[in-house]
Image (tube, grey):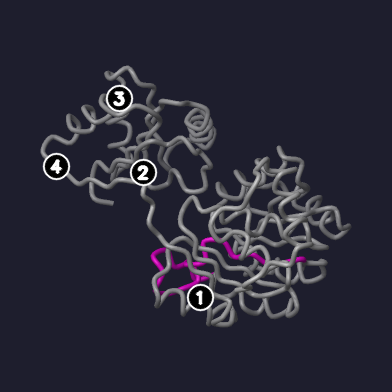
Amino acid sequence: MSETIPATELTDALALLKRVYGYDAFRGLQADVISDVLQGRDVLAVLPTGGGKSLCYQIPSILRRGTGLVVSPLIALMADQVDALKALGVRAERLDSSMAPADKQAALEAARAGEMDMLYVSPEALGSGLGNVLSGLDVSLIAIDEAHCVSQWGHDFRPDYRLLRPMLDRFEHVPRLALTATADKATREDILVQLGIPQDGLILAGFDRPNIRYAISPKTNVTKQITEFVRETPGAGIVYCTSRAATEKLAEKLEATGRPTRAYHAGLPPAERAAAQAEFVASEDMVMCATIAFGMGIDKPDVRFVAHAGLP
């Protein structure tokens, strides 16, 4: 990690931060991560949830020549970030299985022409041959988001993440940036080895979130307990259930509190799921009863509670 940040790089990054994102200063270790990537170093950044990991690759992708490749595990996460970037005027696109072939081709052509700041891809797509197609691009950096998925010791291991190393090595002189909020010592060591990042490339922040409180209660009458909790707790929230049927049943019961409620699970038609998610993002007090198919990658800063109706 750099001890001092070159003045010109910091000035450019801060100017971009203000102009595009509307922030006056970096938080925590963001400046250190961005500085190292701008200088071409390989980095594993372990920053807490809410620590602004996405800016750590978005800003260098815009400042460096070429297109930043962002490896992300979830279509919802990619879609949410790309939509937000486009709204800010940043040239970004994604390549995933939900897109029409013509849209994928248009994104690739824009990247080849140097008209793309960021291109989001899934590890599965890279493993299916997309890596060969992308090898002809002028790549500014390669960011591996949710990097704990690389490690067999991580909580969400994805085998296709293990296949990233050959693609990374094709871009030998392109900085690689791995990011995660959840990696203990064994997981961190595994990520460094699997992605070919040197030990001195680790930037580790603390995990404490003083604004988050955890509480556990014995389960007696779970519907009654959740209903009372929702009545007493203002703001938007998510209640996770252990089955699809349970989400619908609980959402129906919670309507009695007067709060807007929706159910979300993988068995619902895609259009219905998308509508429910859009309503939740826009609402200040909706309660979403969902299976774990919901929530990852949604950028909603005003979620006030997450409750589990059963052990996750």
User: For the residue labelled by badge 2, is the local secondary structure a helix, a strand or a loop?
Assistant: loop
- Lower sequence index among marks 1 and 2: 1
Q: Is residue 295 above or below residue 41?
A: above
Real-space Cα separation, disc 4 to disc 3, in angstroms: 20 Å
Image coords of residue 23 (percent x, y): 65, 43
The circle on residue 219 is: 4
Q: Is residue 241 above or below residue 281?
A: below
Real-space Cα separation, disc 2 to disc 3, in angstroms: 15 Å
Label 1 with label 2: CB-CB less than 8 Å? no
User: For the residue labelled by badge 4, is the local secondary structure a helix, a strand or a loop?
Assistant: loop
Q: Residue at x 59, y 65 (%)?
A: 144
Label 1 with label 4: CB-CB less than 8 Å? no
The circle on residue 294 is: none
Query: Of circles 1 and 2, which is in front?
Result: 1
> Image quadrant of residue 253?
top left
Q: Residue at x 77, y 48 (%)?
A: 91
Tell me the residue that label 1 is attached to.
Answer: 191
Real-space Cα separation, disc 1 to disc 3, in angstroms: 43 Å
- Lower sequence index among marks 2 and 4: 4
Q: Residue at x 30, y 29 (%)?
A: 233
Label 2 with label 4: CB-CB less than 8 Å? no
**CA neighbours of label 1 inside 10 A, class few (<14), some (14 to 19), many (20+):** many
Image coords of residue 120 (percent x, y): 67, 56
Tell me the residue that label 3 is attached to.
Answer: 252
User: For the residue labelled by badge 1, is the local secondary structure a helix, a strand or a loop?
Assistant: helix
Label 2 with label 3: CB-CB less than 8 Å? no
Tell me the residue that label 2 is attached to.
Answer: 291
Q: For the magenta stretch, what is the residue range?
A: 140-160
